Amino acid sequence: MQFNSQLKVAFMQTHNLQKIADELRMLCADMVQNANSGHPGAPLGLADLAVVLSKHINVDVENTTWLNRDRLVFSGGHVSALIYALLHLWGFEVSLQDLKEFRKFGSLTPGHPEYKHTPGIEITTGPLGQGIANAVGFAMAAKRAQNLLGDLIDHKVYCFCGDGDLEEGISYEATSLAGHFKLDNLVLIYDSNNISIEGDVSITFSEDVEKRFLAVGFDVIKINGHDFDEIDKAFEATKKATKPTLIIAKTIIGKGAVGLEGSHKTHGAPLGMEVIAKSKQALELANASFNVTSASRAFFDGVRMRGARAYAIWRKKLITGDKEKLTLLESLQNPDFSKLEFKSYEVGKSLATRVSNGEILNAISEFDLGFIGGSADLAPSNNTTLFKTGSFPEGNNMHFGIREHAMGAISNAFANYGIYRPFCATFFVFSDYLSPSIRIASIMKAKVLYVFTHDSIGVGEDGQTHQPIEQLTHFRAMPNLITWRPCDANENIACMKVALSLQAPNMFVLSRQNLEVLEMPSLENVSNGAYIKAKASKIPTLSLLASGSEVELCLKAQKVLETEGISTQVVSMPSFDLFLESSKEYKKELFKDSKVLAVEALRGLELYALADDVLSMESFGASGKGDVLFKHFGFSVENVVKKAKTLLG
């Protein structure tokens, strides 16, 4: 700490912060101009805040996965020019040439920041508001890590956000949760420039942001976002916080851009060479493009120096300290799920897959202390309570409240933190509220586990609004996301074993109603996405393809068809996504020359890629008992047999 204080004083005494900030903002302007595409306004407006943050943030460019590093999230990904400029100046592997290739195909500097693509980017934020919830997730992850690892974790989470982020509903969900949990390690920096794409924000946004955040339990500090002393004092104050902090920084969009300062025109278009030249002249900077003086580089070198020293101190503490903590950290970072065993279920019993999945989750929880998650106020219905651990932050049961959108984004942050395997849960029909964050998880290939129960018209009396019809089709279309709809408790186990081995988000879509327990399938069969569940009496002329509860229906229909001389096999397809990735040879061997009838009590349009005909839902369902609805909408043995005969002619 003494070293940090001395370094800070040296910065204040030997560096012209205004000149450094002006060079940073013009570097961002050059990047956007060179790309002839991008958003210069916010980077120019935030440059002063970014320079002062550089005196406070602890990151180590040589050890980018250091667990106790500060996390920096830009909720507005359109500020990417500033993000990349900072990463370059701080010493990450982002070169000046990378800045010159901003927004170009194949570059390290795409239009919006992408996790694991650019060194130093902590998370892919995407749509506005996501980043605020991600930052809350990082802060929550750090609080749980503190509980597990003690004084090895004491870092901050910084998040830049703007008016657009605060207008998005997800920001209220997330900050409400942050205030509830008193996340004193969270610092939101609100770029309050009063400008949106359509003009002044007053046309749509007039609430008192300070009162809003005070109401949800934040400390609020109001500053001039271009006054270096005020900015510095605000960051210092957050180090003694007992609540999450919102710094409301009044800024000018396009700061320093001659003739365009404060204009919404600076938001999403290059400034133009003439404006940049005049701006550099007014700021008394060299007119050269991508120019950063040695004095500015020396200032930003302080981030690298401070971070390296902080990491060395932390590493020494880790190695010479409590050996149990070192062992725990290693197990949290590298769980070996090949050693995890699940109990199998007795064939012939009847059990909903949401129930068996709850027991599976508890088995994982007892094996892996980094397995953490919960439900959006539906744990008793989703069967997601972990019985041998407490509630967050002392335990691994997360209570998200009725905040599905934030829950998804928070889970993404837990997945990226470094020691967790997060899961989150709700009814499948409410997955629509998580869709943006699921898409981001899929882009990042983040290992988030989604548990969605009440998977079809089997929901019954709750009616159309609660019966998921089109959701599975939507998520099956999402690249990198692995969807699972197991047909029984034993297949559920096999699916989970495969899911734990994949570097991807996995979604389990589970029944409310009881399903008969069948024989345990092999992991090889399940990893192919589909396999023969019941063989035909001879070479099949018909294959019944199904997932989830409809597999049991097809098994019953198979018996009728076989007695009528139609050689029929049943193919269970727990994962459409993995089956689609399987080889043509495997698919050909599976179906041979049989006609394929797919049966699914959902929309099922994607099944036409595999089947000659599909029996699926063509409406949003109805209110009534599940078995009545299945029969009404054609999911009966009689109708499957009829549909099969029609297909065979």
Image (cartoon, grey):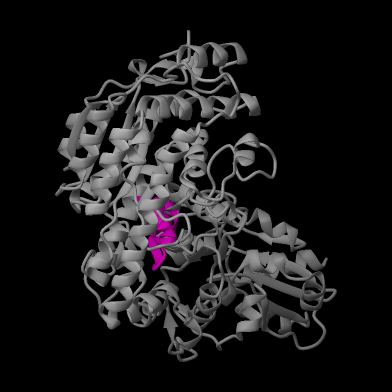
Vertically, is 318 above or below 207?
below
Tell which residue pokes out farthest to the front in this image. Answer: 14
| Residue 511: quadrant of the picture | bottom left
Q: Nearer the viewer, residue 30 or 538?
A: 30
Residue 194 visible somewhere in the drawing: yes
Q: Residue at x 60, y 63 (%)?
A: 600
User: The N terminus lies in which quarter of the figure?
Assistant: bottom left
| Residue 19: quadrant of the picture | top left
Please provide percent x and percent y for residue 504: 55, 64
Question: Total label count?
Answer: 0
Tell which residue pokes out farthest to the right in this image. Answer: 593
Please provide percent x and percent y for residue 184: 20, 50
Question: Secondary structure of the magenta portion, mostly?
Answer: helix
User: The C terminus lies in which quarter of the figure?
Assistant: bottom right
| Residue 142: quadrant of the picture | bottom left
Q: Residue at x 62, y 53 (%)?
A: 477
Residue 245 included in the magenta stretch of the image:
no
Please provide percent x and percent y for residue 551: 59, 74
Residue 373 visible somewhere in the drawing: no
Q: Residue at x 23, y 64 (%)?
A: 393
User: From the viewer's perspective, is 531 left or right of 407?
Assistant: right
- Magenta segment: 406-430
Q: Nearer the viewer, residue 187 or 475?
A: 187
